Image (cartoon, rainbow, N blue to C red):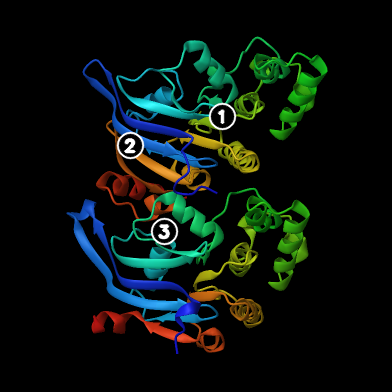
Amino acid sequence: MTSNKETPLLRVTELSHYYGDQVGCEEINLEVYNGEILGIVGESGSGKTTLLKIISGLLPPTQGTIEFDKRIEGPSDIYQMSEPERRLLMRTDWGIIYQNPKDGLRMNVSAGANVGERLMAVGARNYSYIRAESNDWLNKVEMDLGRIDHFPKTFSGGMLQRLQIARNLITKPRLVFMDEPTSGLDVSVQARLLDLVRGLVNQLGISCVIVSHDLGVMRLLSHRLMVMKSGKVVEQGLTDQVLDDPQAPYTQLLVSSILPI
Amino acid sequence: MKNKLREVLSVNNLKKSFILHNQNSFELPVFYNISFSLSKGECLVLSGSSGTGKSTLLRSIYGNYLTHLGEINIYHNQSWINLVGAPPHLILDVRKQTLGYVSQFLRVIPRISTLDLVAEPLLSRGETEVNSINRAKDILKKLAIPENLWNLPPATFSGGEQQRVNIAITFVRDFPILLLDEPTASLDTKNKQAVIDLIKNAKDKGTAIIGIFHDQSVRDSVGTTIFNIEEAKKAA
């Protein structure tokens, strides 16, 4: 378990990003420790996705540093390293699960190839090994193995999302970014996916940063919660504390706006 | 009577109030100047009428409610730490190893079977699957949850059954300190006795307990000390 002195896996310091005059996000500081799930909530346009893009290496920020604790070198600024170095990190130690699975999958190659691709990217060349690993992961995300040679365009939304998870986790990343992983799915599929994500994260000891506007999802998945409004962090703390005893005016409004079922 | 060496928790001058920003920043005071200590094998019963802040006090100790003033010192990993102002991952570590909490309501991920829910805390602590499942079965048996329900998610269970599953999820581990918020509220006499036995058993093994029990019989059979919040407020 994490202790106070442990080096965080990801450390973001004084991060700001502007789109011209518009604030994307401003003065963000955060840390993610090993095995920890950090949730980021906030209304549309509060800068959640901008922040996620920046810290997952997709968008260089206007200012601030993002340090990732690399296996050998230790904490390194992800935008100071060379492009190939960052790319390697993105396909080994990181996983990114997109809100729209079409952004994270290749729609014109088979499900099995989608899952096996990252293994090949890190040097696996033995076909039967790749096939066996892919099968294993399709099993873990509860996919019907009969569909391994089908194209993702024939899959449902829930299946695509599970395929995306298998594709990312096959290289056993240490940090996974998820952008609204369950928002396009109906509730029964959503529950199944949540259960799956939680189980896998527990088993593999992966750290996660999850962006969502669904507070119910956050309560079940995340350990810590960060609340954003107009590009700034208005509150952060233990998930159950932020939801049960919110301190900031905006969080109180947000929590009291949840519709009871 | 108190033996300093056996102390595991001490609360000093704790204050809690809620500030309701959307109601013109109205401040709702709950309690202040709360001080007590708790030793191994002790069961401290919080008393006071409804709305005096008993549950709030338990939740504050668990870190579910944020406190700013006072101290909550807890013996964790062979040293004393103050939970007021502690960083989130330290509180999570305390919850994983030292401090257990049984809330009034069961809140779990849908779709997961009762047996898996009860075994999960052990699994995530690194115990083997066989061992975890066996201990989960053991505690469910002790709490008289019918065996044919074990493979079902608890969402469809009766109130009393859900309450007992909730108790099982916490009691399957051996926490040094337990916070119990009306664990017997919706149970019949027979099941109440099963819970009392569990609590007594834990006490005998040295677990320190803070509990809210409205039922006089439960109070009498497990309580060792009474702490009245209203009187503590008056005295302050």
Q: Residue furthest left?
A: B24
Quote the CA–CA distance across marks 2 and 1: 31 Å
Indicate the quadrant where residue A52 lies: top left
Q: Is residue A153 left or right of residue A99?
A: right
Foreground residue, A93 or B180?
Answer: A93
Q: Which element type, helix, strand or loop, lies under badge 3?
A: loop
Rate crowding at label 3 as few (under 14), some (14 to 19) or many (20 or more) other CA atoms within 10 Å.
many
**Can you tell which mark lies on residue B64?**
3
- Compared with A174, B146 (above or below) is below
For badge 3, the amino acid type reads Asn
| Chain letter, disc 2 residue | A
The image's mark for residue A228 is 2
- Tell me the chain of label 3: B
Q: Compute the Cα span from label 3 to label 1.
A: 34 Å
Let me know if marks 2 and 1 both belong to one chain: yes
Residue corresponding to mark 1 = A71
Question: Who's the residue at 45% across and 20% down the image?
Answer: A57
| Distance between mark 3 and mark 2 Cα atoms | 20 Å
The answer to whether A133 is drawn above or below residue A40 in the figure is above
Whether callout 3 and callout 2 share a subunit is answered no
Residue B129 in sight here: yes
Q: Amino acid at mark 2?
A: Met
- Residue type at mark 1: give it: Arg
**Neighbour class for label 2 at 10 Å: few (<14), some, many (≥20)?**
many
Of callouts 2 and 1, the N-terminal one? 1
Q: Would you say A190 lies left or right of A16 here? A: right
